Amino acid sequence: MEHNTGLIEAIVFEIKDRDKIGGSTSVSSTALCCTHDLAEADGCKQGQIIIHHSGDQDWPKRVQIFFQGNNDVTRMTPEIIPITKTGMYNLYFMFCDPQLKGTLINGETIWKSPMGYLPGRMGPFLKFYGFMSLAYLMLGLVWFFQYVRFWKDILQLQNCITIVIALGMCEMAMLYFEYSNFNATGHRPVDITIWAVTFGAVKKTVSRLLLLVVSMGYGVVRPTLGGLTSKVILLGATYFFASEALELVENVGNVNDLSGKARLFLVLPVAFLDSFFILWIFTSLSKTLEKLQVRRSFAKLELYRKFTNSLALAVVLSVAWIGFELYFQASDPFSERWQNAWIITAFWTLLAFVLLCVICVLWTPSHNATRYAYTEESGEDFDEDEAIALTSGSVKSTLDVAGKVDRKERMPVNSDVFSLGVDLEEDKRE
């Protein structure tokens, strides 16, 4: 019979019991392995991992795997370890023999709770995505009812909102299906995960583009984006690829949040693009509000003020939540608050849904929706009213005589009185 020549130990422990592994109770030492001196002082077995049992004598669990003779390959017999207490558990393969340095371990572990195969920190997402699927479904039904009811008065912007709602419904449904399948089978098929991740990346991209074009006044103060269209499309495409790459690294094949240095490398571009989106959105909102105020489009101005206030509140909440997230992660390095960790991710999904609801309320299909649409005729009326109010009687007579003159010909006459001519020229160049 061949003798044992090497020992690898599989240690299963709850995260709060991490102090029971290694160290000495009688001498000052933080060693993981039992040496000759520690064996005499504490009674541990030399060459094995030190485990201090107190209270529950069965935990942490130790499974020993030995090499036989000159064999450089060994197999671990399957082990079933019942866990009766809720907690964050870890499995470590450890050895004390320096000759085993560089050993490769291949295999798989199967973890299952009474609720299914989902890891504990991912379990709440199953109910959350189910809830969000119903929320998007209800929003979609209400929006579709209004859309069909007033289909003759639909604006182009409302078609964009419809697309975002549809993408949100698909994203939540795909995520719920993926987590449900994972929970039932214990496997996370790559194709299903890729579809779910792709729907999420598309929805995030389109949502940000929707906020941007709304802030630019698309369909309200300008009929098209003009020369900005290519820039907006380029920004959207860049964000999609960056977001898709990040989500793939985080989700495909992984069941936890350990993605290595690749995640940090991919997080930075997405964070930079999000910051650029926010800067461009609020810059565009400022210009749009200024144009509406100059043109005295009070109905549109009130609409955009409500939208600006909602967006500003969302940004404040986002900054506060980022601070809380940093504090949460810094104060919990060992994931002992794993049961609440899902809230960090769920907040962003919920915030995006609330913002979409705000946009749906502000631009809901109705008979009066067309009053928010861009019309060149109404713009001319506002310009002429402003000119009459701000000029003398002689200029008023001149405007009356030249009332049918083309807009391009009479804008320079009024450009000294107010700055609409400059704004319109900017719109034409765009």
Image (cartoon, helix red, strand yellow):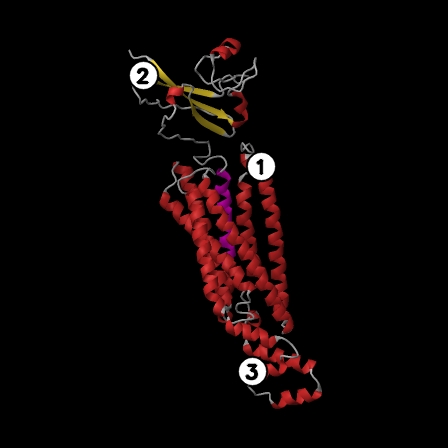
Left or right of 398: which side holds 158?
left
Measuring 60% from the left and 39% from the top, which residue is drawn there? 327
Provide the residue span drawn in magenta: 122-141
Quarter of the rendering occupied by the N terminus: top left
Left or right of 388: which side holds 411?
left
Q: Quadrant of residue 375?
A: bottom right
Residue 202 shows in this picture:
no
* Front-most of residues 309 and 183: 309
Amino acid at the residue labelled 2: Gln
Of callouts 1 and 3, which one flags the residue occurring earlier in the amino acid sequence?
A: 1
Labels 2 & 1 near each other (Cβ < 8 A): no
Amino acid at the residue labelled 3: Arg
Measuring 46% from the left and 43% from the top, which residue is drawn there? 263
- Estimate the spatial distance between the alpha carbons at disc 2 and disc 1, rounded to whole Å: 44 Å
Query: What is the x, y in percent for residue 387?
Result: 65, 81
- Estimate the spatial distance between the alpha carbons at disc 1 and disc 3, rounded to whole Å: 61 Å
- Estimate the spatial distance between the alpha carbons at disc 3 and disc 2, rounded to whole Å: 94 Å
Measuring 48% from the left and 43% from the top, which residue is drawn there? 264
Left or right of 362: which side holds 61?
left
Amino acid at the residue labelled 1: Ala
Query: What is the x, y in percent for residue 261?
Result: 46, 40
Measuring 43% from the left and 53% from the top, which residue is drawn there? 241
* Front-most of residues 228 and 251: 228
**Which residue position holds label 2?**
68
Left or right of 306: which side holds 204?
left
Taking the magenta stretch, the answer to whether it contains residue 123 is: yes
Residue 293 shows in this picture:
yes
* Front-most of residues 168 and 415: 415
Tag of residue 330: 1
Crowd class of label 3 (few under 14; some 14 to 19; many from 20; radius 10 Å): few
**Which residue position holds label 3?**
407
Residue extending furthest top?
A: 40
